[in-house]
Each structure stands twice: as structure tokens, then as C-alpha cells.
Amino acid sequence: MHPSHRQQDSIILWQRRLWKTMDEQKKARTLVDLLKEHHVDDVLEGEVIDEIELSEIKPNPFQPRRMFDQEKINELSQSIKEHGVFQPVILKRTREGYVIVSGERRYRAVQQVGLKTIPAIVRQYEESKVAEIALAENLQRENLTTIEEAEAYKIVMQKLNLTQGELAEKVGKSRSHVTNILGLLNLPEEVQDMMLRNQLSMGHARALSKLEDQEKIIKLAQTIVQKDLSVRQVEELAKIEEKKNKIQIKKEHRFKQEERQLTERIGYRTRISDKKITIFFDEEQLEDVIKRLLKS
């Protein structure tokens, strides 16, 4: 007995719904989903808001933000002076007291006002979730500097054991974006600090990252800030430095075989350039070096 047309239509509709459900389940949970799942902005039924002593609270160790906008904190402090704290912070209990899961700006503003306590909800989270929520909040609601974003990505990848591809899905970014951002952590600390203070853009940093010599990277970064160079100008300068470096490498390797042979013959490390031969030895070894050279 064959199914009727109506039954066939019902089967096809059921299959489509099933496939849609399976597709939705396959999709990676994004950070937006995470904030919704953990009701970061909500007071759940049965939860109690307590006044917690500020002295018992520590900032989130996974907080990606290293630079807080003081003007915004001043505005929030003024609002708290006039109206109090509208939204409680979320804390996780630890052996030493409490750690902030969500609401560090409110915590800093309350400190600035001079209050001793802050309204809070205490929830139990795994350490990995605390790191994930901190990243989610900052990426979704505040503009992190690219260095803060890179450090946050690194922490979450380590805590959740994620690949770059998995992290990209979770934060809703392309894999190349995540790779480029993480690559900034290879720049010298001095240059990272310039990015943290928004003195260098992502474009500047990408141009600088093509250079290998750390000292040259720092020097060029300082020039960018001093002369307010555009990304195009920096790319051109980086190309020139790269060419110089390749020429220097070729020159350094020109007499590599002769350096090895001479080192073996006299027993002392040597370096040969276009205009001189350098022999490395200690002061008390001078006579021995002379004897070996005369023998050669």
C-alpha cells in the first residue's frame, strides 16, 4: 500500500524539520549564546542579591581589558552617587573570598564613590566558564584593543582547549582574523604597549610583524608614532628593511665555508667579511693564536 500525497507531504515536512533541527544542533555555540545561557543580565528566580564587602572581592583574573575608560567610570560613579547600583554584579565564591564574573566597571565605580559594599549575586562557575564569560562580555559590549583581544583569545583557547578554528566559530569571526590577532602577541612588548594605548593600528602592527629583527620593529614603531605615518608608508618602509635584511644575510653567508675551514685550522672561532677577518679569543690566548697563524 503506497502512502497518499498528503502523507508524502507530511513525511517531507517532518524530514525538513528534522534536518533543520540537526543543522541548528551542529552550529557552534557563539559567545552571544553563552551570555544568554548564563543569564548574565538577569536575576534568576530564587536568587538572592546580597551586599558583599568590596574588601572580599577580587577582579576577574581572566579579564581581558587592561585599559578601562576612566571617563565612563566617572559617569557611572556619578550615577551611582545619585541613584545607587541598579544592576548587581555577578561573583564566584573562592577560598579567599569572591572573584568578579561580570560587572568590573560597576565594581570600580563603586570603589571610586567610596562605598564599602556592592549588591551582588553569587553563582558557582567552573574556571573555564569565568574566562569564557569575561571574553564574551568584553567582545560583545565594549571595544577591546587588539592586544587585549589577542590576550583574551589566548586565555580562552588554553582554558577550553580550543583550536583557532573552533575559537573563530565561537566568537563569530573568520579564522584568518583570529590567526592575525594572535600573531600580534609575537611583537615586542614595547610595541604591544603602544597598541594597548591605541598609538598603533592593526594595519601598522601587521606591517611591523613582517620584520624579524625585534630592535628594528621597535625603532620603526617609534617612528610611526613620532611622525604619524600611515599604514601604506609603514608597509613601504617594512619592505625596504626586509630587502636590507636579505642582502645582509647573503653577505653574512658569503664566506661561511671559509669561516668553517679557518676555525678548524686554527682552533678559534672566526668571522670573515668583505674587509676583515675577526678571530674570537681571550687576552691570555693571544700568543697561542699568533703561533697557530704562523704555522698555518
Image: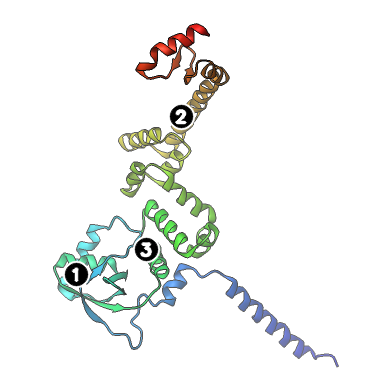
Identity of the residue drawn at 65% across and 81% down: 18
Residue tagged 1 = 55
Other-residue count near label 1 (Cα within 10 Å), few / some / many at <14 / 14–19 / ≥20: few
Q: Name the residue furthest bottom.
A: 1
Q: Is residue 107 left or right of residue 271?
A: left
Distance of label 3 from label 2 (alpha carbons): 37 Å
| In this picture, residue 140 sits left or right of residue 112 | right
Regarding residue 102, the answer to whether it shows in the image is no
- 221, 215: nearer the viewer: 215
Q: Separation of disc 3 and disc 1 at Cα?
A: 24 Å
Name which residue lies at 15% across and 67% down. 113
Q: Quadrant of residue 7?
A: bottom right
- In the image, residue 144 lies at what x, y percent? 36, 57
Q: Amino acid at mark 1?
A: Ser
Q: Position of residue 109 (x, y in %)?
A: 21, 66
Note whether 112 is above or below 194 in the view shown: below
2 or 1: mark nearer the eye: 1
Residues at marks 2 and 1, CA–CA distance in whole angstroms: 52 Å
- Where does residue 147 sit, x and y in percent of width and height? 38, 51
* Residue 48 occupies quadrant: bottom left
Q: With 171 as the anchor, is 119 left or right in this view?
A: left
Instruction: Tell which of 108 and 95 is nearer to you.
Output: 95
What amino acid type is highlighted by mark number 3? Asn
Q: Which residue occupies 26% across, 82% down?
A: 49
Q: Name the amino acid, label 2.
A: Glu
Tell me, yes or no, if residue 23 can be seen here.
yes
Q: Residues within 10 Å of mark 3 (few under 14, many from 20)?
A: some
Tell me which numbered mark, 3 or 2, is placed earlier along the sequence. Answer: 3
The secondary structure type at the circle numbered 2 is helix
Label of residue 138 in the image = 3
